[in-house]
Image (spheres, grey):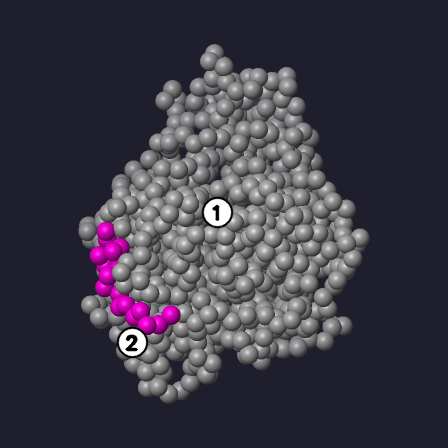
Amino acid sequence: MDEAESDQASAGLPPDSRVASRRLANGLWIMAAQVPRARQSRLVGAAGVGYLDDPPDCRGLAHLLEHGLFLGSGRWPGRSALARWVGTLGGRYNAHTGEGVTDVHLHLPVEAAEAGLARLVDLLGYPRLDPGALADEVEVLDAEFRARLDDPALHRLAALGRLFDPSHPAAACHAGNRATLGDDRGELVARLQAFHARHYHAGRMALVMLGPQPVDEQLGLLERHGRRLPATAADTPSPDRWRWATPRGVAWHSPNESTLPAAGTLELLWPLPGALADACAAPLQAVASQLNDGALTATLQQGYAVQELEADTAPEGTGPALCLAIELVEPPADIAPLVATCQRALRQACRRHAITPPPARTVDLDAWPREQARRLSRRPPARGSVPLDRDHRTLSAWLTPEQCRLLWREGAERATVTWRQIEETATRWRPLDLPWPPAASALPEVATPLPSRRDLADRPVGPRSDDRPAAGLLFRDARLSLWWDGLDWPTREAGSGWCLGWPAGATGNGGRLRDWQRRTLALRQAAGARDQALTLGSDARGDWLMARGSPAGLASLVDQALDGWMAANTVTAPTGPASSSGLLAQQLLDRLATRRPPCPPGAMPPLLCWARGEMGNREAQGTAKGFAERLSHARNASPPPDAPQGDDQGMTWLAPQSADRAVMLEVEGGDDGPRMRWLLQLLAHCHDAAFHREMRQRRGLGYVAAVRYREASGWPRLGYVVQSPTASVETLRQAILAFLDADAVRLARLDGPQLERLRHALLARQGPPETHDEAIERAWQALRRLPFDSPSPPDWHLAPWQQECAALDSLTAADLEVLASALARDTLPSRWWAHAPAPPGSPASQHCPPAT
């Protein structure tokens, strides 16, 4: 890897990280990332093969092979060997089959990295593919396919296929099910073995590792184990075929979307040849960044209720393309002005020859190794590059109105429109006339909302030696508590920060937050383009914001965010919830992180501020007092409740949206202290695998069965969730109760070594922060939980993870057993959630009777 490629790969990692890669003699790409404060090792193996490589008469083969990799390998032949080994370490594993890449990823304690690499390589290169186990896995795949019929993401891919050449593999659904894989199990196993031999070899694979170990040590481990992968130099990936039909548009919606709110997303797609997208990666990303800088959003919001807008260079399911996705709160009467405005913005972005790389964002350390492994396995970095100006002119020729395709998700079925149906997925779709509006129909341009309104001319800039604040409580009166810095973190990164929190309405916080986010979307995008970040939130303790980054105009950024909040706070009508997505079970689990936990009155001061950075004492106090004054003029409103209400039996129902049933038992911790949070996480780990086996394998209830831990405003919760295509809601509820009655306590009885392993695993997941941004976010939320009248001790500092680690260390096996006993006796606060299909012919209802 040359220096430029190394810089590109490491962009967004913590500043003291190191990245290196090389290609081995057998053709395998390896990459290592040394992140000194990483809590765990992330290991990813990727193969450059995906669902588009399925044989036409056996769709789902690549996905089935992904499942088959976990059914035992040459050195570890047991069917659940990897799951048991990862489980004993408290780690995690998963896999994903995309259109051109399949990846397997492990998260493990650092000391298990080498053992994990050995198992990962064996799994990828030498799977057993046992016929009996594979026959069972076909049934699992079929159940997964039926469950995914509730997920709009599957229907989006199906509708996207209507934009492709019908002869291209991308035009068909590749989710895979019993019908597409066939009934001849012997032939299926033979085809899987041949498919693996052809595609899973070192020349089309990559191994990536991220951890705290020195980069040279990581490369040594990757090379030692990567050499074991089979080399098949004779096979090379087939060239990409052009998948797109002539430019056209498609409108679509999910089969049951008529029961859901009328929101929609319009995607403008500009396909690109693969070689051009690779060569023009930098200018293409620069064009996307200019579309994301807030100016286009501000312009569109003159005529449309734009909730989200994002230009993306790697959209799902399209191959190389530029995608501009715009989520709207209400369906527009006419999209022609919207399309014309977007086309104009794209032309302007393409004409700008002075391309400035966007500011590096802090990356997700879980996602980074997967992205790198997928990139390396599919399209190894090219040697050399074409001059930027020539790249830019070539790229512009493809980003024209004539090359644009439209994909429009309409949130509700319109009775006046004739819809077609895709047989395999039941996706509703119709051709969409491409609007070719003249440039004159575009909306008037609006300047990017820059944070420049606050006049700092009469205020000192930066701290003088005699004006530097001391860490701790800087100021308090009846309206304001202002704390200064105190972040106990080993490195100091450039930039300033303001965190504000204040009480808000007792209901409707979800709708208010969504409206606040819509009103500040352009502002947040503009801040991102200026190396700043604005994050908004709402929970039981009230509403809050975090502004951080370059100090220039940061106070003004907060001012404008408060203006947006005060406008949103006057809304008393529903603003439209976010469009549903994911499996029903996932939607239920999402409720755990969004439902308001109990919060005592007076838990927050009128305004809580936490400031950091290049400010003096007088400037920090004066600015905070200005924020408090602004909020004092806010008018309180009474938004409607966000969540559906329960019935007489204590069951809370989701709006009907599919034919499946799903039930979740929500278990709430008795308090939000670190001991309770750790205990519920330990209990989730003890129960999850056994609950999955009981519900899915022994009872045969469905594909989805899990125990998951979530928090809302720091308040801990567990969700025991099952989704089934056949069982009734009452059957699912009784199955959960039977599991808790029989196994809740037994599974929670741990001996000393077991408890110690789980403690170690939890610290790897949630111990001291890995990045500066994570440290700030965790410190801020800990400060919000602090009683607002707390004094500031002389040695005050913000490092909540130190107290959390001490709390975990103090837990005993007896503590966990007591909690499990309380759960089995039903003495913990709990709540039932459910979904059932609407009875035939009945109108959609928020409150459905239990299905029998």
| Front in this rendered view, residue 414 or 70 | 70
Query: What amino acid does circle 2 point to?
Result: Leu
Residue 256 x %, y %: 61, 70
Asked which quadrant contains residue 233, the reply is bottom left
Residue 847 x %, y %: 60, 64
According to the picture, the residue beneath numbered tag 1 turns out to be 712
| Front in this rendered view, residue 165 or 560 | 165
Q: In front: mark 1 or mark 2?
A: 2
Residue 725 x %, y %: 48, 75
Q: Residue at x 53, y 59 (%)?
A: 276
Q: Residue at x 32, y 72 (%)?
A: 234
Residue 352 visible to an observer of this rendering: yes
Q: Specify whether residue 222 is painted magenta.
A: yes
- Residue 477's place in the image compared with 692, above or below, is above
Q: Which residues are magenta?
A: 220-236
Q: Which mark is residue 129?
A: 2
Residue furthest top in the image: 466
- Mark 2, residues whose alpha carbon is within 10 Å: few (<14), some, or many (≥20)? many
Q: Specify whether residue 474 is painted magenta.
A: no
Q: Earlier in the sequence, mark 1 or mark 2?
A: 2
